[in-house]
Image (cartoon, rainbow, N blue to C red):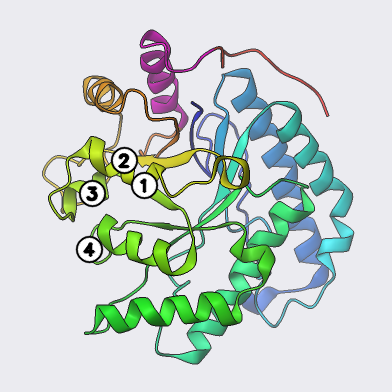
Amino acid sequence: MKIGYPCINQTLDCSSSRTFRLASYSEERLIETVEQNLACLRRILEFNVNHGLLFFRLTSDLVPFASHPINTYKWQEHFKMTLRRLGSYIKNNNMRISMHPDQFVVLNSPNPTTVQNSIAELVYQGSILDLMGLDSTAKLQIHGGGAYGDKESAINRFAEVYHTSLPAEVKARLCVENDDRTYSLADCLVLHELTGMPIIFDNLHHECVNNGEPMREAAMLAAQTWHPERDGILMVDYSAQAPGERRGKHVQSIGEELFHDFLVETEGINMDIMLEIKDKEASAHKALAVAQALGRLKGNLPNVHKAT
């Protein structure tokens, strides 16, 4: 088991998601911003390795406007060696990486322009993982999309786009996550049957939208969609309901007892856990301690730093 958090480290004094306004786009500004983002990413990765946090979600904003028509710069060539060195560091330290495109990535949209923009964004994010030299256990995570008044047709439209329009490099990394409003685990299982995509299991979303499956059974069903050699083990998004907030809103800080109970309930299911909790690495440290006390980490202890 690996435990981690997404995108932003609140301890360090840098961001790997610096960007700028489209109106002020220039190649010089792009290069400067990406250099800063990748330098900060290296610092975040080193922090995580030193603290035993071996699962991390890269920000979608590493390369601003990468999938926008305005960006014609060959940034892939310019940053090829930097990205490869980052990938070597990740592999040398046995980290697992994912990316999660924003909500505007909707493969089953009835709008062809939305679909084409979604594919362009997936190609960009997949190319980051490819340039790092990471294998197909590094995943791209998306939601099922909309229902548009006819969920069955929407699911079939997703599958058609998957099979006819996505490059093989993207399909090798793509996963679908059960969401908190429209696509339950059962819906994602249908998508899995149609496409072969593994399912990222979100415990809080399952609490919000489900078909009566107990948590353990749901996690097991999701785990069975992962091919160990090709996909790695199950990825789980873990959070808890923020008190007094709208249904599905993530909690500010981890409840250690609740997390303990989740790990006990899912004992024996091999998984890597992404904490979708607002205080990021602060909660990740606490989660690591809970998992260590339960014997779920099997030696993934802090201070195992290896250089590139």
Q: Amino acid at mark 3?
A: His
Spatial CA distance of label 3 from label 2 is 10 Å
* CB within 8 Å, label 4 to label 3: no
Spatial CA distance of label 3 from label 1 is 11 Å
Residue name at image x 48 percent, y 71 percent: 105
The segment highlighted magenta reads 281-298
- Where is the C terminus found, in terms of image quarters? top right
Residue 75: image x %, image y %? 82, 64
Q: Amino acid at mark 2?
A: Ala
Residue 191: image x %, image y %? 39, 66
Crowding around mark 4 (Cα neighbors within 10 Å: few <14, some 14 to 19, many 20+) is some
Q: Earlier in the sequence, mark 3 or mark 2?
A: 3
Q: Earlier in the sequence, mark 4 or mark 2?
A: 4
User: Disc 4 marks which residue?
Assistant: 181
Residue 159 placement: quadrant = bottom left
Which SS class for mark 3? helix
Of the numbered discs in the image, which one, if any, rests on residue 206?
3
* CB within 8 Å, label 1 to label 2: yes
Q: How many marks?
A: 4
Spatial CA distance of label 4 from label 1 is 18 Å
Query: Secondary structure of the magenta portion, mostly?
Result: helix
Residue 291 placement: quadrant = top left
Residue name at image x 66 percent, y 60 percent: 126
Residue name at image x 42 percent, y 25 percent: 282
In this rendering, position of residue 166 left or right of residue 203: right
Closer to the observer: label 3 or label 1? 1
User: Disc 2 marks which residue?
Assistant: 219
Q: Nearer the viewer, residue 292 or 225?
A: 225
